[in-house]
Amino acid sequence: MTQSPLMNNYSRLSVAFERGEGAWLYDQQGNKFLDALSGIAVCGLGHAHPKVTAAISEQASRLIHTSNLYTIPLQTELAQRLCDLSGMDNVFFGNSGAEANEAAIKLARLYGHQRDIDNPAVIVMEHSFHGRTMATLSATGNRKAQAGFEPLVSGFVRAPFNDVEAIRTIAANNSNVVAILVEPIQGESGVRIPDQDYLNQLRQICDQQDWLLMLDEVQTGNGRTGRYFAYQHNDILPDVVTTAKGLGNGVPIGACLARGVAAEILGPGTHGSTFGGNPLACAAALAVVDTIESDSLCQKAADMGALLVEGFQREFEGAGYVRDIRGKGLMVAIELDQEVTELAVLAKVKGILLNVTGEGKIVRLLPPLILNESEASLIIGVISKLIKILVSDE
Ligand SMILES: *Cc1c(COP(=O)(O)O)cnc(C)c1O
């Protein structure tokens, strides 16, 4: 094996992209690929979006970084936009999803201590994903991701996802709980969509128990599911929302939004980030938020997502090996009864980028919100055909 100067923590496909435009990526040989993954739900506006490019270029030529020792007007402006969109009261900015969740976990702990709970605990779910830092890895419900990194951070209580009774049982037995941290739709473990009233029920329990309802919208936020935030499909407000991936369209930025008591917890010196909310990232995110609104990208994501799900349902009607076809907006999954890990490579050869997750049995699609109908048809046609070939080979 040739020695790489990179640590060996990723298994990568052998393709390198040189440029992108809209839903398409071009490799160094000039081959084009329809990006049905958007850099893992990051480039929601597609690649090289002119408004984002202009915002970044203009800001880069003016001012990139000053630190949070000073006022950053673009940060205040972005925070206000996000509060208006979400119903939250204020925002802390970091640079990634994990950092946004770290902030939420720290908020929950401070909230607990302020209420004289010495060992505050946060309820987290099986099959969840919250990041790779020690606290967010400990919150994550995936033993494989945690293996070898013990001792994990304590203070998490695990419950099955989409199981309200399990949460009630914890409430009756554990007086250290101060918050629930949950994804409205579990992304990394395979687009797991809970019952329609799940979040409403969690909201009710949190109200009864004085717990914070903290939603990890790192993946589901920023229009991905057909609303700006996924909880907006329900008639509730959380206490804390975290987001990141799609917020900067590729420029690293993460945000932890809070409301009510949760918005009053952090004081000067309690938390921080050198890069968090820098002018460059905020300029990019403001362009993203503007464009999602001006181009009705939430509605487009809802429409295109429905088209994808219907298309796959038509293609796989009566196919016994397909366990489920599901989606909300442009978070779409085809769950099979067998492993199809090679699909990512085969689809790449056919010019489509996607991801296979859930022990290799769940095909996950996260195309950009700007996807058009002919691109959606192409995805349906190529992927259906490949799955049929792969499955008949078994
Ligand atoms: C990707 C993801 C994270 C981690 O985000 P990073 O930016 O990789 O740290 C956290 N939560 C959810 C739901 C995610 O999908």
Image (cartoon, helix red, strand yellow):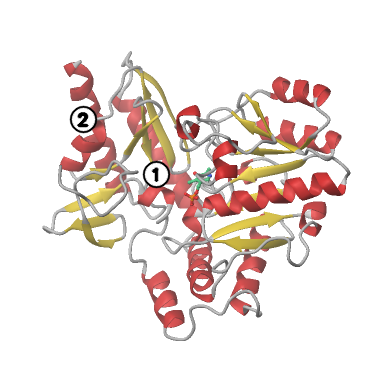
- The residue that appears at 88% across and 45% down in the rendered structure is 115
Please, what secondary structure does the residue beneath circle 2 have?
Answer: helix
Judge by depth and name the residue closer to the eye, 294 or 104.
Answer: 104
Residue 88, picture quadrant:
bottom right
Residue 216 position within the rendered picture, expressed as x and y whole percent measured from the top left? 60, 44
Residue 101 or 21: which is nearer the viewer? 101
Direction from residue 267 to residue 148 in the image, left or right: left
Dot 2 alpha-carbon crowd within 10 angstroms: few under 14, some 14 to 19, many 20 or more? some
* Residue holding disc 2: 386
Q: Is residue 201 left or right of residue 353?
A: right
Structural distance between the alpha carbons of marks 2 and 1: 18 Å
Q: Where, quadrant-wise, is the N terminus in this rendering? A: top left
**Residue plotted at (83% across, 38% down):** 207
Residue 91 in percent (x, y) is at 67, 62
Q: Are marks 2 and 1 in contact (CB under 8 Å)?
A: no
Question: Sequence-wise, which precedes: disc 2 or disc 1?
Answer: 1
The residue carrying pointer 1 sits among few (fewer than 14), some (14 to 19) or many (20 or more) residues within 10 Å by Cα, namely many
Counting from the top left corner in percent of width and height, residue 59 is at 46, 80
**Above or below — where is 308 with respect to 228?**
above
Determine which residue is flagged by label 1.
366
**Above or below: residue 351 compared with residue 385:** below
Percent position of residue 235, x then y: 71, 42
Task: Give the structural element (helix, strand or loop) at label 1.
Answer: loop
Q: Residue at x 42, y 37 (%)?
A: 332
| Residue 184 seen in this snapshot | no
Q: Residue furthest left?
A: 29
- Rendered-image quadrant of the C terminus: top left
Residue 265 makes an appearance in the image: yes
Amino acid type, residue under disc 2 in the picture = Leu
The amino acid on which the numbered mark 1 sits, given as a three-letter code, is: Leu
